[in-house]
Every structure is written in structure tokens, then in C-alpha cells.
Amino acid sequence: MRILLVEDDPELADSLTRMLKAGGWTVDTLHDGVVADQALRSEDYALAILDVGLPRMDGFEVLRLLRERGQTLAVLMLTARGEVADRVRGLNLGADDYLAKPFELSELEARVNALLRRSLMGGERQQQCGELVYDLNDRRFTLCGQALQLPSREHAVLENLIARPGRLMSKEQLAGKVFGLDQDANPEAIEIYISRLRRKLEASPVRIVTFRGLGYLLEVQT
């Protein structure tokens, strides 16, 4: 899954980025409200972490514009201001959660997991397709009861497919969720990751099916 982090404090932004990437997320880190608004208009994110005190456009305005466009991705607001009025304003504008600084990195990580679990999995802790099970809490796959170890890009592709079992995802959609702004989002590379994943799933009935010109879906074959 792909996360947008918008934080103007370079030291905090670096710490949060390293923590999120260590957890396996694809992270785009920005420091400016206007640039963040542009990214949210053009890129595909599962979650945005918005600092309130951003240059040029504050986090409240970024959130307001996001919701006016009808975008429903989860939003976690960060602020040095802990006043109730600020929290109420953010929540009324459509924030899903609110975290006042200073905070522990472990708390932010837990809130990110909870938000994604609610928004992407309807509150469920696990996603399943036959013998393939994905636990969102620890972000691990098991296949036929055994841990399935995957490199980060393969993990990201399979994570997106199991979130939509039986539904098509195009190469372009997968590339948009797997690659960050600072990476070469080559849809053709998705074919390589799909091929590798197929080999790792072949001991089970779980299959990644190709619909030529349309995309891929995950299903159990009988």
C-alpha cells in the first residue's frame, strides 16, 4: 500500500518515513501543502498523514479540498496544537484520526494499521483467498499455514490483489500503488512481479489470472 506523508519538520519527516518504509509501506514524503494537494489529485494513496502547520497551504485546507473532490482515502492529522477546537475542526472536515505532537512512533504505526484495517478491510484483521491469508496487523502472508516471505515489491503487488479478490486490477493501477513519486513507475515491471508470485503460489490452488489487455485478479481455482 502507498502512503502520503506531509510534514514540514525535516527531522520528524525523516524519522516517520524510515519507520513507515521499514514496515513495508511505499511512502511519498512531501513538505508543502500546495505540492501535497497536487499529489493527492494525481496519485493513488491508501492513506495520507497530514501535518496541520504546512507552508503555503495548511493541512486543514488540503483535507477540505481532498474531501470536496470526493476522495475517500483515510487521513491522519498531525499537529503541535492539542486544543479541542482544532481536533474538532479536523474531524469535521473529514479526518479519520488526529494525533497531537509529541507522540511515540509506535503509536503512530498502530494508528496507521488501524486506519488501513478499517478503510481497506472493513475492520477485519485478515484478508483471505483460499489458503492464502494476509494479516494486516503484522503485514505478513501465510500460504497453506506456512509463512510466505516476499521481497517488498512482490509483497506490495500481492497485498493489493488480495485486498480485491476476484476483481481486476490493471498493470497501471498496480504500478500506481507499488511505486513512489521518486521511483520509475514502469507498468511493465509488474509483469515480472506477477510471474515471480505465480511461481511462489503454484503449490496451492490460489492463482493470479491474467485477462489480456485488462489486468490481473486473484482467485482460487478448483
Image: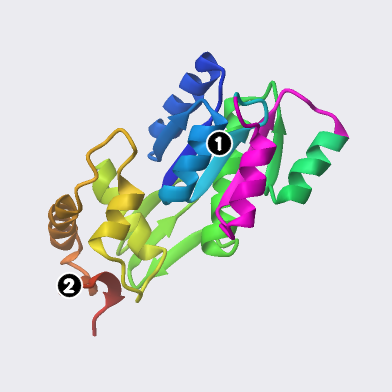
| Quarter of the figure with the C terminus | bottom left
Q: What kind of residue is marked 1?
A: Glu
Judge from the rendering whether residue 63 lies leftward or rightward of residue 171; answer left or right.
right
Quarter location, residue 133:
bottom left
In x, y percent, where is residue 70?
59, 60
The outermost residue toward the top is 11
Judge from the rendering whether residue 203 lies leftward or rightward of residue 84; answer left or right.
left
Quarter location, residue 25:
top left
**Is residue 150 something one can see in this rendering?**
no
Magenta stretch contains residue 59:
yes
Q: Helix, strand, or loop for circle 1?
A: helix
Q: Residue at x 63, y 54 (%)?
A: 67
Q: What kind of residue is marked 2?
A: Gly
Question: Is 25 placed above or below 132 here?
Answer: above
Mark 1 — residue? 109
**Is residue 185 something one can see in this rendering?**
yes
Q: Residue 213, which numbered label? A: 2
Q: Which residues are magenta?
A: 56-84
Cα gap from disc 2 to disc 1, whole angstroms? 37 Å
Q: Helix, strand, or loop for circle 2?
A: loop
Q: Residue at x 16, y 63 (%)?
A: 198
In x, y percent, where is residue 160?
36, 58
The outermost residue toward the right is 84
Q: Earlier in the sequence, mark 2 or mark 1?
A: 1
